[in-house]
Amino acid sequence: MDEDKNYSEAVKLFDEAIKIGKKDWIYGDRGRAKVLANDAKGAIEDFTKAIKLNERDVYYEWRAGAYGLIGEKQLEKEDLIKLEKIQQQNNK
């Protein structure tokens, strides 16, 4: 339980950081904290915002994992395909 509280506090700190500047990594990291605080749906929203700001492969990976947590297997698969495409492009 204490760990969940720490993650919830981290989410609040990321909320404050977003007020200062909407950076992709802030949304990504807040999404990770939300996953750890058992808020996969909230995490998906943050990962989607991060992707809109910067299509990094890691955001697709993290969002796929969050989709998996809520049983959205098709959306998880779609993100894993996007992840693979980005990684292939980066390796050219």
Image (tube, rainbow, N blue to C red):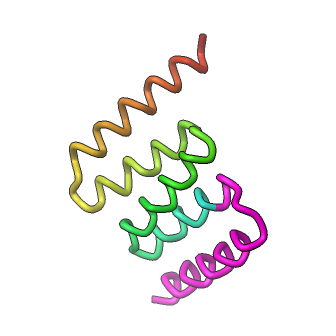
Q: Is residue 9 left or right of residue 84?
A: right
Residue 58, given in percent of the width and then of the height, sits at 54, 42
Residue 52, given in percent of the width and then of the height, sits at 55, 46
Could you tell me which residue is drawn at 32 percent across and 54 percent down?
67
Q: Is residue 39 left or right of residue 20?
A: left
On screen, residue 49 above or below 78: below
Per the image, is 47 magenta? no
Could you tell me which residue is drawn at 45 percent across and 64 percent down?
43
Residue 19, by quadrant, is bottom right
Residue 50, given in percent of the width and then of the height, sits at 57, 52
Residue placed most toward the observer, 23 or 43: 23
Q: Residue farthest to the right?
A: 20
Could you tell me which residue is drawn at 37 percent across and 39 percent down?
79
* Most common secondary structure along the magenta stretch: helix
Q: Is residue 43 left or right of residue 7?
A: left
Per the image, is 5 magenta? yes
Give the extent of the magenta segment: 1-26
On screen, residue 39 above or below 83: below
Could you tell me which residue is drawn at 36 percent across and 67 percent down?
41
Residue 24, given in percent of the width and then of the height, sits at 65, 52
Residue 80, by quadrant, is top left
Task: Please state, as top left, top right, bottom left or bottom right, where the N terminus lies in the image.
Answer: bottom left
Task: Please state, as top left, top right, bottom left or bottom right, where the C terminus lies in the image.
Answer: top right
Q: Residue farthest to the top?
A: 92
Residue placed most toward the observer, 43 or 2: 43
